[in-house]
Image: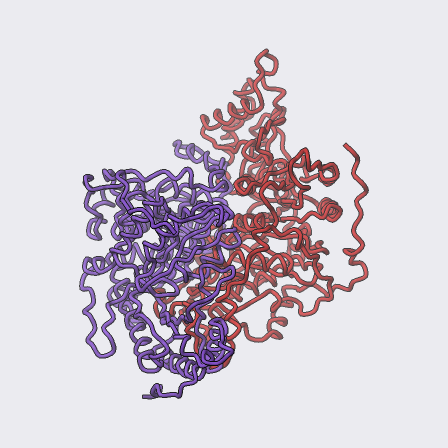
Chain colours: A red, B purple
Amino acid sequence: MAPPAAIEVLATSDTQGIVIPDALTVNGVSARRAKAGKLNGGTAAFTSSDFFKHPSSGKPKAKRWDNYLSLESKSRMPSSLKGAAKYLGKPGLISLGGGLPCAENFPIEELTIKVPSPPGFSEEETSKTGTTVTTGKYDVSNGSGAYDLSIALNYGLGVGSAQMIRFVTEHTEIVCNPPYEDWQCALSVGSTSSLEQAYRIFCERGDYVISEEYTFASAVETALPLGIKFVGVQVDSEGLLPNLIDEILTNWDATARKARKPRVLYTVPSGQNPTGATQGTARRQAIYKVAQKHDLYIFEDEPYYFLQMQPYTGPNSPPVPAPKTNEEFLKALIPTYLSMDTDGRVMRMDSFSKVIAPGTRVGWVTASEQIIERFVRHNECSNQNPSGISQLVLYKLLDETWGHHGYLQWLIHLRLEYTRRRDALLEACEKFLPKDIVSWNPPAAGMFLWMKLNHKLHPSQSTNKPLTIAEMEDQVFLAAVGNGVLISRGSWFTAEREGFEAHELFFRATFAAATEEKMAEAIYRFGDAVRACFGVSNGGGDVEA
Amino acid sequence: MAPPAAIEVLATSDTQGIVIPDALTVNGVSARRAKAGKLNGGTAAFTSSDFFKHPSSGKPKAKRWDNYLSLESKSRMPSSLKGAAKYLGKPGLISLGGGLPCAENFPIEELTIKVPSPPGFSEEETSKTGTTVTTGKYDVSNGSGAYDLSIALNYGLGVGSAQMIRFVTEHTEIVCNPPYEDWQCALSVGSTSSLEQAYRIFCERGDYVISEEYTFASAVETALPLGIKFVGVQVDSEGLLPNLIDEILTNWDATARKARKPRVLYTVPSGQNPTGATQGTARRQAIYKVAQKHDLYIFEDEPYYFLQMQPYTGPNSPPVPAPKTNEEFLKALIPTYLSMDTDGRVMRMDSFSKVIAPGTRVGWVTASEQIIERFVRHNECSNQNPSGISQLVLYKLLDETWGHHGYLQWLIHLRLEYTRRRDALLEACEKFLPKDIVSWNPPAAGMFLWMKLNHKLHPSQSTNKPLTIAEMEDQVFLAAVGNGVLISRGSWFTAEREGFEAHELFFRATFAAATEEKMAEAIYRFGDAVRACFGVSNGGGDVEA
């Protein structure tokens, strides 16, 4: 294969000479809100991130993606009825236009939640010091609140409620401060849905998408029925290797592949599922440069961004002190692709599933105005917008009770929770797994530990009937189930499905779900299963020890 | 055009000889539940309508639709990770498989709603006698409830929660009792989403779908980006004309149309949007027979099914007495397509948007097992399932507080509410509209009044520059806005968009949203605008009168 040309940053995306205003900080939120005046958050009120961002940022505008839009996405027209909304501002106008039901017929008069009061985030503390927040049906017209049941229970607009768009826009500016002017946010019903919609915006049947060689199974399974295949890129402990992406794209043979050169990179930069790999800052910068060189659009899927943990110090070392302030915490996070996206070539997918609860079915995407507009048009003709009840509960929790300060405090709490869980799993692995056979990298983020089994040590290798890696995987998986532990098979996560043949033997374990005791017991059982399959005796300690 | 052949029911779908067991009744629910035993409704518990239906119905099986499935739908594979769920039943097994977060990290400890207690459904009654229902995080493991926050806030399966699937399955059996064996329900995030998914299951780019000539604008706008066009069928006061559907299909010229013969009928049988038309029983039967003759699959979109109102008796007649019992109420409803669907050729789309609240973003579909399975596969790779918070709130309201009896009582209450609203709007129309120009049929269901303006009476018609209907529509619409009332234009609802030219002049008014006083004022203003455009003097009474 031809060696790829040097990677150069395009001159147009060089922001050296541009003065970017200071990013929004947690402490700056109230001043900005005061300046913006009362939130217009009525029933199906029109809203946009533009109402809540730094008003004139002086940043460059995003690149246009006209040639990247699919036929489906290009042909989405704004709703004709929604076009009539512009008349609704006329004073005294009575609308017999839209079929919005009347709030008096919504049979939910009050909704109350009990939530933790920072910094007392544990269940035990909440039972003693938790905050109880009640929402009525007409709090907004009564002047007793900024969001209420009459609004949340009615139809909303495709972008989401003004209340939640304000919160996620501010949060995104605080965390990412995107370096281009026309970025916006839109709510989604979770990142699985965001990703499906993103495929439908950017891809046609027959296209290839680039990703890690092992990736989120659902990302592949969502793409395949749409006729989209994956090109898997080999990874190291920091995930995607930029030079390999460059090589694949430089040498792309459209005729042989029967597909045009890929235009989309799908990546989970932090705590990648399943490998647990986290791309460092330099790695992200290098990948962004490759994306610029080949004009790749990046789907930045970041459910685990805030599950970045404390550095792993090993079983006998003292833990690294926790971030003391929000500023320290934010500084400890690896910069997002969105934060380095001078071109507007990133759709960042955020989700409340891992940081609040999956059952909210609320997430959001951030991208340039052009892409968000297409995304919202699709929302209007599919899920419409996330559950108003979910949006109300999130608003009452995140904005009204916690505020941005409290939310970041919660995220620090979660960081320490996941650090504790990961460390417990790693300790069990150190103790109970045969280290000559099983190896792993301590994950810096996410929920998953990716374990590599040295298939060369499998006893069948020295016979004249060596097992294939798929057969070994089957054997170990079933032995583990037989021992009473379910661990995910590596092959479930292959990016390239058709005719895939594994060269390495992997398993994935999560530290999100089980208690520390159960994790230890599970790893003990798994170690036992591995030893049995690899024909070595149990010398790995005792779970009671 | 050739006259179509006689419509005959296919012999295989003749159920005359089949003994169908009695339908489930409201009073039969508790016995059936008692027999089924404890609900298995844990975190992401597998569920199916089959667990809750009449166990052995003796009905025929649904037709297979293998040749109707789109390439996209056919290629959906079950999730590999979800396939591992079968091992989870093993006693003592510890799962480090799926990345489900631990409930202790969900920062919502309690959720309380205040809801009406039947029969006191009004807001005023609820403020005095409403029921307050609290859900904790661990009610299920504590034995104090059948659904809790630890379950609702976690991931669920694509079909929906066991708790809500049980409720909607029972409700569907009570209301529709589908006459084939293998029907099932799946939750959706609302009917707009159900319809998008249905298109993607049954249609390919280039296909035509049959519908009313004026139809739900969003149904068309959802279809167009997918490359799906509509063939509009002329309607009368009962909606779709079956002989015209037959004619269109019999004479379908695939070459001239550059499209295969349509396979899908999209219809809103009750209170059709925008025409307000409701198909009577005989009309539905005749349309079903045409569907059988041409092997059409029917999308039965029924958001307004329970907004069937009391018969309209005119301004000076006494109202028809309200249904006294649930049985009387159910008998007063026109049978659904699903209830006559001996072939399993109907996907019925139900929604809580109009009968509880749109902001729940919860609906459900009912169809044969084959189609539901495809629908659920798509859910898994898009919205996943409706908000768990919405599902929990609906369950607590509908199942735990009201039960099926209370829910039907609520639906009777809503019937009378909408009757009152419709009657108020019609009274205003009688009073304030120039009846020589504007005509209408009193709607029997739904939220909309469809008004036809006699364009032949427009003064421009007798000049040498007669306005087109589109121009008249524009004139009246803007005059109405000028007078302070927004009424939807008929042309927004045309099924056939490309090169459409209107032959009649229509406007749509809703009686769902405004108060009775505002509706009267709005119609007064509209009448004024019409008179101004049609050059007649204001002789229509006074809004104060």
Query: Percent x, y for residue B518?
Result: 38, 79
Answer whether residue B119 is visible to the viewer in this image: yes
How many circles with numbers are drawn on the protein?
Answer: 0
Query: Percent x, y for residue B13?
Result: 27, 41
Answer whether residue B103 is visible to the viewer in this image: no
Residue occupying image coordinates x 76% and y 32%: A1
Position of residue B13 relative to residue B273, above or below, is above
Residue occupying image coordinates x 37% and y 78%: B437
Query: Which residue is situated farthest in the top direction here?
Result: A464
> From the viewer's perspective, is A493 left or right of B109?
right
Query: Percent x, y for residue A72?
Result: 56, 51
Identify which residue, A545 or B523, lies in the foreground. B523
Position of residue A235 relative to residue B255, above or below, is above
Query: Percent x, y for residue B160?
Result: 40, 47
Could you say which quadrant of the image residue B302 lies in?
bottom left
> From the viewer's perspective, is A524 left or right of B272?
right
Could you say which quadrant of the image residue B114 lies in?
bottom left
Identify which residue, A156 or B302, lies in the foreground. B302
